[in-house]
Amino acid sequence: MPSRYAVRIGKIDVLVVSDGVLPLPTKMLGHNVEPAVRATWLNNMFLPPDAFDWSLNAVLVRSGGQTILIDAGLGLDPNLNLPRAGQLVRRLQAAGIDLASVTDVVLTHMHMDHVGGLLVDGVKERLRPDLKIHVAAAEVKFWEAPDFTHVNMPQGFPDALRTVAKRFAQEYRGQLRLFDEEHKVAPGVIVQRTGGHTPGHSVVRLASGGDRLTFAGDAVFTVGFEHPDWHNGFEHDPEEAARVRVRLLGDLAATGEQLIATHLPFPSVGRVAVDGNAFRWVPVFWDY
């Protein structure tokens, strides 16, 4: 099945790689609206009423002699029974990507479906010893004592998220490169903190030769175009997350640049249009 898709942004090579899919209950999508309203949207989108598969997308970027992995996938968590996720390392290998060639990792945030791939047995030993892992300082600070009072997650997820984030920080602390608001990773590759989803959640902006693309991490979900004010169960500050989403989608609609996001359907490459008081997702035509 398709698991990677290539995009060119000026002189920057971009490869979207699927980490698989994550089945989640629909009740955590737009949990601040009436169930009947949410059910109508799901029905109109031809989605099942109780649960559906969320895509997990990571991105590999090559710019200025650097090879940058943006997010690292779920990895393996047998306690959560998610056998169709955690495919990133295998699929990078299938694409001919040697883990030792990765010079930098950028983390949009430290939820387990973004850092877990670095905790798979044998992965750290295959990474280069001078690997730099770029993450917002606010994100690392948050996971020292995370607040789950505003989330709406399936049972077991909060404990798993705490455990994975703590283990990741312990194992890779010496390779973390912290930034406050904005940081240049490579030529044309800028990571910017947005907050909202988590305090240190960040997006990655690519620009080269007049072309632009944003990897939005978890700032945007499928329902977020029509209903940017709907809260997602994994958002630690859902009100701020909604404000971030509206600002980001408005910016993308104004520039016409391409968008990729973690949980939009693979390969998740498209653009944003304004649609009245909301937005419209315009996927690109696949380039075979």
Image: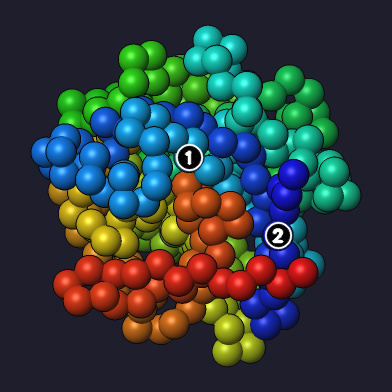
Q: Residue furthest bottom?
A: 210
CA gap, disc 1 and disc 2: 18 Å
> Where is residue 6 drawn, in percent x and y?
72, 65
**Badge 1 or badge 2: first in the primary sequence:** 2
Q: Secondary structure at mark 2?
A: strand
Residue at the (33%, 33%) spot, across then down: 49
- Name the quarter where the C terminus is drawn: bottom right
* Amino acid type assigned to the residue bearing label 2 in the image: Tyr
The residue shown at (39%, 73%) is: 272
Please give the name of the residue rendered at 47% of the width and 47% of the height, measured from the top-left corner. 263
Check the picture and name the quadrant holding the N terminus: top right
Residue 180 seen anywhere in this rendered image of the structure: no
Report the residue marked by disc 1: 54
| Image-based side of 85 in relation to 5, left or right | left
Image: 243 above or below 288? above
Q: How many marks?
A: 2
Q: Is residue 180 left or right of residue 107?
A: left
**286 relative to 72, above or below:** below
Q: Is residue 140 left or right of residue 119?
A: left
Estimate the x, y position of residue 110 in percent, counting from the top left. 46, 37
Q: Amino acid at mark 1?
A: Trp
Q: Position of residue 221 (x, y in %)?
A: 38, 51
Q: Is residue 277 above or below residue 191?
A: below
Q: Residues within 10 Å of mark 1 (few under 14, many from 20)?
A: many
Q: Nearer the viewer, residue 164 or 135?
A: 164
Q: Looking at the rendered structure, which numbered label has been put on residue 5?
A: 2
Residue in front for this viewpoint, 149 or 259: 259
Quarter of the image for residue 252 reads bottom left
